[in-house]
Amino acid sequence: MSRLRFSTAREVFETFPSVGKAIATRPVAEHPLAFLRRLAQGPAPSEAIGFAAYLLPRREAVWWAAQSLRGVQPASAAADEGLVAAEAWVRDPRDETRRAALAVADAGDPAHPGTWAAFAAGYSGGSMVEGHTVPCPPDLTAKMARIAVLIAIGRLSGREHQAALRNCVEACIRLADDDGKTS
């Protein structure tokens, strides 16, 4: 069953106006996964990472970011507290694990991709502030997941960079489209 919430790429842009700030390429009336592939093969393939983050539902976006980081970062990522906290929330998406991920992110190093994955989980819903009702904007998880993956990929060069980008896009496609309808 497909996890896609959108039938066209244009719907993603209409639902999340902030995606237009991250992606200069504008969609035509095309399936979102076809647009994602076009971005990955276009002149600015990193735009595909941003679109992938917005395309997926929040929980899947955090899982995609976490799995992308695991695939891109060295083995030392196993000890990355932010990444571990994001994965914990995906497995147990209760408010307590979301808040725990947010606490790890707040204390984390903004130079580490795992910190941003934890922010993606922490801003996935509920209140942004403990003790006060400050709802998370609907696009914040996507923004944080995008940052996490772009930081990790940005540390690579040459063929490693291109392979990692391609692998992250393909991971999104597999996660979003497990029924095989990619166009």
Image: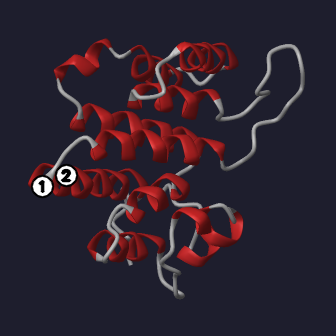
Residue 2 visible in the current orientation:
no
Q: Nearer the viewer, residue 25 or 63?
A: 25
Q: Which residue is mark 1?
A: 158
> Where is residue 63 shown, x and y percent of the image?
43, 36
> Where is residue 128 shown, x and y percent of the image?
76, 27
Q: Residues within 10 Å of mark 1 (few under 14, many from 20)?
A: few
User: Quick check: marks 1 and 2 in contact, CB under 8 Å?
Assistant: yes
Q: Residue at x 32, y 67 (%)?
A: 45
Residue 105 visible in the current orientation:
yes
Q: Can you tell which mark lies on residue 39?
A: none
The amino acid pointed to by label 2 is: His
Residue occupying the far bottom of the picture: 28
Q: Quadrant of the N terminus?
A: bottom left
Left or right of 16, for residue 74? left
Identify the colour scheme used. secondary structure
Left or right of 138, for residue 31? left
**How far, Cα to Cα, is label 1 from label 2?**
5 Å
Left or right of 112, for residue 98? right
- Helix, strand or loop for disc 2: helix
The amino acid pointed to by label 1 is: Gly
> Where is residue 28 shown, x and y percent of the image?
52, 87
Q: Image height check: is 146 above or below 180?
A: above
Q: Image height check: is 45 above or below 60?
A: below
Q: Which residue is mark 2?
A: 161
> Where is residue 75 shown, x and y percent of the image?
17, 21
- Helix, strand or loop for disc 1: helix
Residue occupying the far left of the picture: 159
Q: Image height check: is 62 above or below 4?
A: above
Quarter-wise, where is residue 81 in the image?
Answer: top left
